[in-house]
Amino acid sequence: MSSSPTLGKILPCIWWPLLLVLCVSCQAVGMARGHGPLFFNLGYAALAVTLFVLERRFPHEPQWLESDGQFWPDLLHTVLTKGLVQLAVVGGATFGIHLAIGERAAGGFWPGHWPMAAQVALGLLIAEFGLYWAHRLGHEWPWLWRFHAVHHSSTRLWFFNTGRFHFVDTFKSIVLGLPLVFAAGAPGAVFVWISGITAYIGMLTHCNVEMRFGLLNYVFNTPGLHRWHHSTDLREGNSNYGENLMVFDLLYGTFFDEARRPPVRIGIAEAMPATFAGQLRAPFVWHRYQRRAEAKPEEYFNP
């Protein structure tokens, strides 16, 4: 009996690093055996199942366990927009590069003599610069916000809406991130690692599991930081733009974390159509949809 309270304090502190390490280890085994994509998918699926269970056993916000009516749009965004764009762009430009150039000698200024772990860390840092600005512009440039708002229109966070992105938003992030690493001369394996780690951290970032992060918040994008990012209060929401790392948020003054609980109420001030098709179309006819929401609020899940 005495160990239970202790375990209850320890588990929230180890869930995030433990799950990330297990996913990375799975991918490392697969790449060592020449089956990187297969083992990535296995690790990603296992992470999804694990988070599904943990969210119901140790939820950060019990209210977020309630349905928001967006299961099918979230699924379709994940499979048909984010999934297909990543398959086309990342599959062609990352796994394809890896198959085409294999373990070619690093070009440009790339330190190919470094251990692979150090090369991956460098690759993550370089990619993060582009990913950070892609994300920040999605908030600060009104036209791009219309596409990014599809993701932020979620009224709850859980692992399943990790892939809720408009295809334009996904494409923008990919083309601003990976080309920087390619221009630096990184070998193919580094691209595979960056894509895998980004996917793992992305799912972890959106999970609804009670966790504690401490100093990890100053290095990685964690669920604790990302919950602030989804706040309807723009002082909190226009912050923590990092995809994987927080270095540029700290550098450019957009890091936000306070010693209080992030808000339960998340979302956007604008209206978003309730259907998948409507969400794909909304950014292109944004003002028309906002006017329509006043007349037909039943067509919108967050008027």
Image (tube, rainbow, N blue to C red):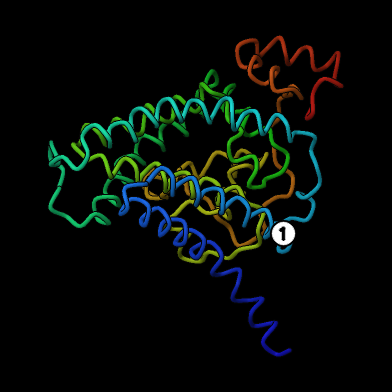
Q: Where is residue 145 shown, x and y percent of the image?
A: 56, 25
Q: Is residue 105 left or right of residue 53?
A: left
Vertically, is 4 above or below 125? below
Q: Where is residue 79 shown, x and y percent of the image?
A: 59, 30
Q: What residue appears at the point 28 percent right and 32 percent down from the top-left corner? A: 97
Closest to the observer, 153 or 6? 6
**Occupied quadrant, residue 118:** bottom left
Q: Is residue 100 left or right of residue 151?
A: left
Q: Where is residue 170 shown, x and y percent of the image?
A: 49, 28
Q: Residue furthest bottom?
A: 2
Q: What residue appears at the point 33 percent right and 39 percent down from the top-left corner? A: 127
**Count of labels shown?**
1
Mark 1 secondary-structure assignment: loop
Q: Which residue is mark 1?
A: 59
Closest to the observer, 234 or 69? 69
Q: Where is residue 213 shown, x and y percent of the image?
A: 53, 64
| Kind of residue sitting beneath label 1 | Pro
**Where the C terminus falls, by quadrant?**
top right
Vertically, is 71 above or below 144? below
Q: What residue appears at the point 56 percent right and 25 percent down from the top-left corner? A: 81
**Occupied quadrant, residue 54:** bottom right
Q: What residue appears at the point 65 percent right and 60 percent down from the top-left corner? A: 260
**Where the N terminus falls, by quadrant?**
bottom right
